[in-house]
Image (spheres, rainbow, N blue to C red):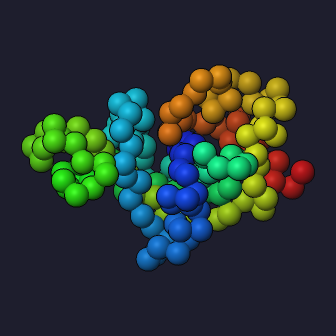
Amino acid sequence: MNYWLMKSEPEAFGIDDLQQMPEQTEHWDGVRNYQARNMMRDDMKIGDLAFFYHSNCAEPGIVGIMEVVKEGYPDFTAFDPNSKYFDAKSVGDKPRWFMVDIRYVRHLKRPIALKELKEYPQLDGMQILRKGNRLSITPVSKEHWDFIVGLENA
């Protein structure tokens, strides 16, 4: 099993939105970064767990946990000229962008803010904590995952 951190702006799509989706499941679309795309296309597997991270908000941080329920497949929003994620160079037989389906698992007992995560030397090396990191999807080590889940009760 792999572990991930996936960012979304709560104004666009937050953890409460995921929880309210039919079967609490939704596709994770609109990723337009090749490195993040490659992780969804090549590395994410059914059963992998991901932290749901609220970004670009008053208090960015980890707010919940979700599970990958469908492995990478072409992001159909890239084919739709009416979508804000449209990409004319992404075509059916040669899709440029991919997505996965994720399912809500649970909210954390409390949000864990980015500023709190930065306080722990145990999380050194975690990509979200690296200066200049802008990736919307990053891998998380098992050690970092377990440490963060343990922070819920702190």
Q: Residue at x 59, y 23 (%)?
A: 132
Compared to residue 136, the image places residue 11 above or below, namely below
In the picture, measured across the screen, residue 65 lies left or right of residue 103, that is right
Residue 66 placement, left or right of 42: right
Up-down relation of residue 111 to residue 126 (above or below): below
User: In this view, which residue lies farthest toward the left?
Assistant: 93
Q: Is any part of residue 71 visible from this angle?
A: no
Q: Where is residue 59 in the image (x, y as percent from the top left)?
A: 73, 49
Q: Is residue 29 visible?
A: yes
Q: Which residue is nearer to you in this view: 24 or 11? A: 11
Report the residue at 44% width, 77% height from top.
Answer: 22
Measured from the top left, where is residue 91 in percent x and y?
Answer: 13, 44
In the rendered structure, the answer to whether residue 41 lies left or right of residue 50 reads left
Residue found at x 63% / y 33%: 128
Image vertical order of residue 98 relative to residue 77, above or below: above
What percent of the width, then of the height, locates residue 148? Answer: 75, 44
Q: Nearest the camera: 11 or 105?
A: 11
Where residue 43 sits: x, y (%)?
41, 37
How many numbered callouts?
Answer: 0
- Residue at image point 65% right, 57% down: 64
In the image, is 7 to the left or to the right of 119? left
